[in-house]
Amino acid sequence: MNGTGTNKGTHPSAGSTHPVIVVGAGPTGLLLAGDLAEAGVPVTLLEKRPHQVSNLSRAFGVHARTLEQLDARGLADDLLATGSTITRLRLFRRLSLDLSTLPSRFPFLLITPQYEVERLLEQRARRLGVRFAYETELLALRQDTDSVDLDVRNGDGTAATLRAGYVVGTDGHRSAVRRAVGQPFPGVSVITSLFLADVRLAEKPDSVLTVDGAGDVFAMIASFGDGWYRVMGWNRRNEVPDDHPLDLDEVKDVTRRALGTDYGMHDARWLSRFHSDERQAPRYRVGRVFLAGDAAHIHSPAGGQGMNTGLQDAANLSWKLAAVVKGQAPDSLLDTYQSERHPVGKAVLRSSGGLVRLARAHHPAVRALRAAVTALVNTAAPARTKALAQITGIGFRYPAPRGAHRLTGTRIPDVTLAGGRRLYEALRGGRFVLITPATVQLPRHADPDDEPGTRPAVEHWAGDRRTTVLVRPDGYAAWAQDDADTAAVEAAVAARFTSIGRH
């Protein structure tokens, strides 16, 4: 537990430099702040809202790659206990993806509300010593080559100027950090009018996630797990502004037309309209300021990729920022956050936008394209595998230097190591893990008391693989080589840890 004393937290100190300030206490900011604290980097998390559990979040699905990242932090099993899993994800009426074939420990989609993800990440962040400052609003920031000054307003109306070594904006699609560094947010509205409703149902749906559409309407029902259900819907013939009144009768009508029944919905506790944009900031790094999650990119809800992409941003940036702050890596390492994550955000923008456009197909030519895509994915294994990898996040790879081993930049799955340990257990604590054949005998190096980032833990394959792989804390291969002897592995790791870990 940190020393905030109350849920509101205390005003952050203006008299010293904070190594890192994270702005925005959603899932992305919480994971990032927790990772930094676990690496030994003091971090302050600012949030303009009061501290409270909110049901306003729209995310309900946690994909396989995100669950793998949470597993590397010891949180996946606890999160699984909060929801239910589905092994088939419906995209169109005739197109669904079989998630049970995923090469992952988590071959499914976990249906659980976003607030459960936030709850676990906040508990971890507090346990690790993250300093929270709720009701603290960013007004402006200025930076030079050495630091960033943030002008903030506290909940009691007082103003202060904070100084930080680095700032990360995880403060959503209306990001004050993004505006403060002058980053545009180009894009378009994909769906101009959607509605959300939290209701009770007289009849229980067959699945924890029910999705379908018919003609000009679409609806989705997801279970909170406590008797309440979230309904999302769209009606092509009633696209109205976000502030247009919404009542339960409209929700029931659209749901009946899309799903064939409204399940006897009643007692709406919340009704709201919103529109869905697809936008992306051109630069995720501006000097000492970074953008992540919805502050950097927003997508259509198709495929449930928004929150998941933001959490992957945090996992990529956190270990790099910790290494640079602690003097274990050069500042240039932070540039790889842009080169690795911006293309992923762009790909998700493309895929989620494409899905929603095909789902809304009205013109005969687009309907024909949807039929062709459906047939291709349903019948061609490579297309199906690619679609699964894209939507679940397990298929993304990062750029590798010319001539690098084929594994460099790829996600390393949760392989079993010698002794029965799993890779994602070995990654806990934000460590690099070196996996070698049993014939390569190196000192074990890291142990639970070692400072993260100083040297890799050494593990052996459970089988007879001949490849040596250095796995980054986010589960991607930093370096690999086939049939390397002990001397070659020692030299390669020493060379790489000169810039990313070991003194």
Image (cartoon, rainbow, N blue to C red):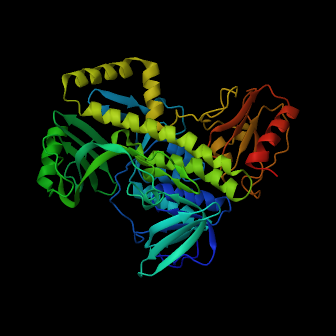
Image-based side of 75 in relation to 403, left or right: left
- Report x, y in % for residue 261: 16, 42
Image-based side of 36 in relation to 495, left or right: left
Placement of 476 over or under 196, stated as above or below:
above
Which residue sits at x=42%, y=78%? 155
Image-based side of 439 in relation to 371, left or right: right
- Report x, y in % for residue 148: 58, 65
Q: Residue furthest right?
A: 487
Placement of 397 over or under 284, stated as above or below:
above
Which residue sits at x=39%, y=65%? 53
Placement of 432 over or under 324, stated as above or below:
above
How many marks the image carries: the answer is 0
Image quarter hosting the N terminus:
bottom right
- Report x, y in % for residue 356: 30, 36
The residue lying toward the viewer, choosing from 392 and 12, is 12
Image-based side of 272 in relation to 157, left or right: left
Which residue sits at x=38%, y=17%? 379
Q: Hey, which quadrant is residue 115 in on the image?
A: bottom left
**Res. 462 visible in picture:** no
**Res. 167 visible in picture:** yes
- Report x, y in % for residue 262: 17, 46
